[in-house]
């Protein structure tokens, strides 16, 4: 285990492993502005993980970055901040059935340090624009996690599963998950068996979700099933949110039985003491 004490201060992780810049269609800040903000907020290591969502249904937000420009900007940023803040090359890939080939190709086309796999859509519909008033809540919860399980049985070109219970962000009510515990267990066992990580995404505080992403019960279950690879991500689209609520997230992780958290270099997790 690598115990790099510089990456934690007072029990708070200083590595933000899920962040965005203007290369994501939903971020209004340039990479330079975002990283200057990260430096000011005391970030020691930051993974820039801009969006790539092949097959995304809204043409106004295609979430297909200028890959060449993105890669050049990452390389330039690493040089600029060398010795002051570690810049990790990342990407957040939106996982969609029917787009696995394009997603896998993108994950391998550049020497990323970390690839986040996330679910932003359900069967071709963005979770943000889904009309929840027309859907039965418990049935939708089952449909969503069944879809996640189906996809992860096939797609494995990712290192960490991002904001696993993202449905809670949009659905408007915290439904009982006990009917889908078996499905969630299967998802978590895939992560453990394939050596994939789980992310604590602190954006839930900004969105007023009312629960952690993932839920505390999911995090504890992942640990009980043998999960050890854990990252912290603010999902910052604004420089004000780097390391947002990381102190509370670290307490949550410790209460769930984790002694370490991870950063990724060259697609491999490195463990740091909490």
Image (cartoon, rainbow, N blue to C red):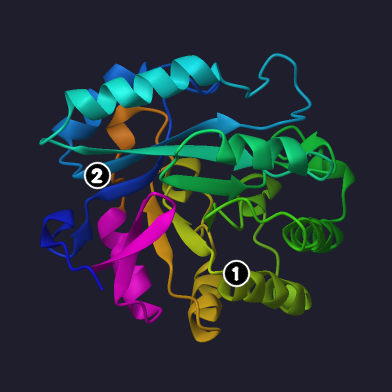
Check residue 247 for magenta coloring.
yes
Res 22 seen here: no
Question: Which is nearer the eye, 79 or 169?
Answer: 79
Q: Position of residue 27 (x, y in %)?
A: 47, 22
Q: Quadrant of the N terminus?
A: bottom left
Magenta-drawn segment: 246-274
Residue for point 52% across, 55% down: 159
The nearer-to-camera label among 1 and 2 is 1
Q: Secondary structure at mark 2?
A: strand
In the displayed structure image, the side of residue 133 where residue 84 appears, left or right: left
Question: Which is nearer the eye, 198 or 242?
Answer: 198
Residue for point 67% across, 42% down: 104
Residue 153 position by quadrant? bottom right
Residue for point 18% across, 45% down: 44
Dot 2 surroundings within 10 Å: few (below 14), some, or many (20 or more)? many
Q: Secondary structure at mark 1?
A: helix
List the residue tagged with mark 1: 194
Res 123 seen here: yes
- Mark 1 vs mark 2: which is more N-terminal? 2
Residue for point 61% across, 31% down: 52
Check residue 60 for magenta coloring.
no
List the residue tagged with mark 2: 45
In the displayed structure image, the side of residue 146 where residue 211 appears, left or right: left
Q: Position of residue 39 (x, y in %)?
A: 17, 32
């Amino acid at each position: 285990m690598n115990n790099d004490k510089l990456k934690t201060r007072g029990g708070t992780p200083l590595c933000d492993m899920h962040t965005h810049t203007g290369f994501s269609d939903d971020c209004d800040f340039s990479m330079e502005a975002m990283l200057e903000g990260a430096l000011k907020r005391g970030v020691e290591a930051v993974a820039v993980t801009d969006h790539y969502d092949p097959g995304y249904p809204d043409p106004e937000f295609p979430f297909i970055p200028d890959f060449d420009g993105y890669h050049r900007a990452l390389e330039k940023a690493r040089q600029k901040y060398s010795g002051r803040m570690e810049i990790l090359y990342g990407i957040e890939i939106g996982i969609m059935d029917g787009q696995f080939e394009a997603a896998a190709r993108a994950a391998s086309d550049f020497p990323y340090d970390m690839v986040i796999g996330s679910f932003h859509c359900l069967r071709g519909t963005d979770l943000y624009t889904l009309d929840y008033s027309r859907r039965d809540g418990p049935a939708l919860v089952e449909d969503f996690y069944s879809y996640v399980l189906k996809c992860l049985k096939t797609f494995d070109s990712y290192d960490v599963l991002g904001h696993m219970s993202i449905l809670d962000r949009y659905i408007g009510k915290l439904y009982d998950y006990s009917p889908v515990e078996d499905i969630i267990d299967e998802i978590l066992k895939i992560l453990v068996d394939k050596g994939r990580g789980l992310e604590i995404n602190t954006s839930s505080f900004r969105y007023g979700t009312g629960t952690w992403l993932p839920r505390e019960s999911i995090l504890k279950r992942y640990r009980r099933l043998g999960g050890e690879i854990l990252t912290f991500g603010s999902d910052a689209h604004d420089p004000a949110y780097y390391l947002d609520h990381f102190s509370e997230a670290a307490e949550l992780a410790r209460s769930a039985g984790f002694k370490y958290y991870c950063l990724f270099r060259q697609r491999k997790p490195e463990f740091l003491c909490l």
